[in-house]
Amino acid sequence: MTSASLISNMPGKAVPVSVNGVEIAAKAIADEAQNHDADRPEKAWAAAAEALVIREALLQNARATGLTAQPHSDEAGRTETDDDALIRQLLETQVSTPEPDEESCRRYFENNRKRFRTADLYEVAHILLQADKRDALVFSRTRKEAQILASELQRRPGQFEKMARERSDCASANEGGRLGQITAGQTTPLFEAALADMSPGDITPDPVETPYGFHIIRLDEKADGAIPEFEAARPLIEEFLRDASWRRAVSQFISLVIGEAKITGVNLNGATSPLVQ
């Protein structure tokens, strides 16, 4: 989305921010700016002004079509504001999208097969010797201790669980170091990188350093991820394509509404809307 540029730039300038003669107060823009991350205050202000201009234009359009707010409530009992309800109802009545057909779904599947690959699954055990880099002496001593332990386990791999119970600083020590089944994202990148180079039965010959300290890792089992059949992936593809189609249609509708409105104080420059981010 292209952020708005401000004609008025910051509050207090000559040109007010307005939509069809309805001015948006500088305080409202300042309050909204707190919801927009930016490296400079004027960028947050511009993004806030854009969001409120689009919102006001949609609300005016909703009222002009005769809609009355019918707020929805969620399972937690939270209820939409009247303005949010009006915008939702406007989009529901004015924006329509076709359902994804099988040809579109298959084409997306074939072009994005890797996205559907399930994660590799690892059965892992480890021994952790905690170390803090801020204490250089202890860190160096722990590294040497971990290397001695790793070398010992290369000679006597059957002692892994015993050493884990005696030496590991991880709670898994009570289970002989066993972490159970893990997938990508459940450990640190360095730990995962070590696993990727291992085969079942391997124990890392050198300690693996992570922010937690030094690990000696044993890989017990590995199940490679797989790409599902099309029919299994189809519901996800349909949901994705349906959502993408809706977002495009909403953006087009908002562009039409903005194009028909008289706006001062900001140049939207082809902006879409925070509603469809």
Image (cartoon, rainbow, N blue to C red):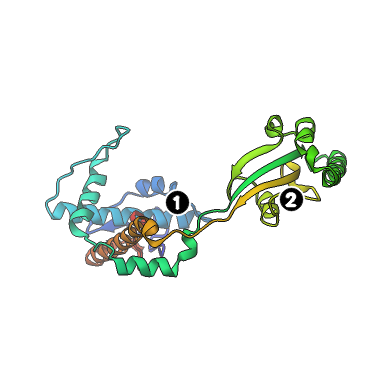
Q: Nearer the viewer, mark 1 or mark 2?
A: 2
Number of residues whose C-alpha sits closer than 10 Å to that of mark 1, classed few (under 14), some (14–19) or many (20 or more): some
Q: Quadrant of residue 61?
A: bottom left
Q: Is residue 114 above or below residue 211?
A: below
Q: Is residue 123 left or right of residue 114?
A: right
* Residue type, numbered disc 2: Asp
Q: Is residue 147 left or right of residue 257?
A: right
Q: Is residue 156 above or below residue 21?
A: above
Q: Secondary structure at mark 1?
A: loop
Number of residues whose C-alpha sits closer than 10 Å to that of mark 2, classed few (under 14), some (14–19) or many (20 or more): some
Q: Is residue 107 above or below residue 210?
A: below
The residue pinned by badge 2 equals 202
132 and 208: which one is in front?
Answer: 208
Task: Give how far across and how far down residue 1 sits, in percent.
Answer: 40, 63
Residue 248 makes an appearance in the image: yes
Task: Give me the disc on residue 181.
Answer: none
Residue at the (58%, 48%) spot, across then down: 183
Task: Give how far across and how far down residue 12 sits, in percent.
Answer: 39, 53
**Residue farthest along the left direction in this orientation:** 66
All told, the count of numbered labels is 2
60 and 127: which one is in front?
Answer: 127
The residue pinned by badge 1 equals 36
Residue 131 makes an appearance in the image: no
Quick one: label 1 or label 2, which is nearer the N terminus? 1
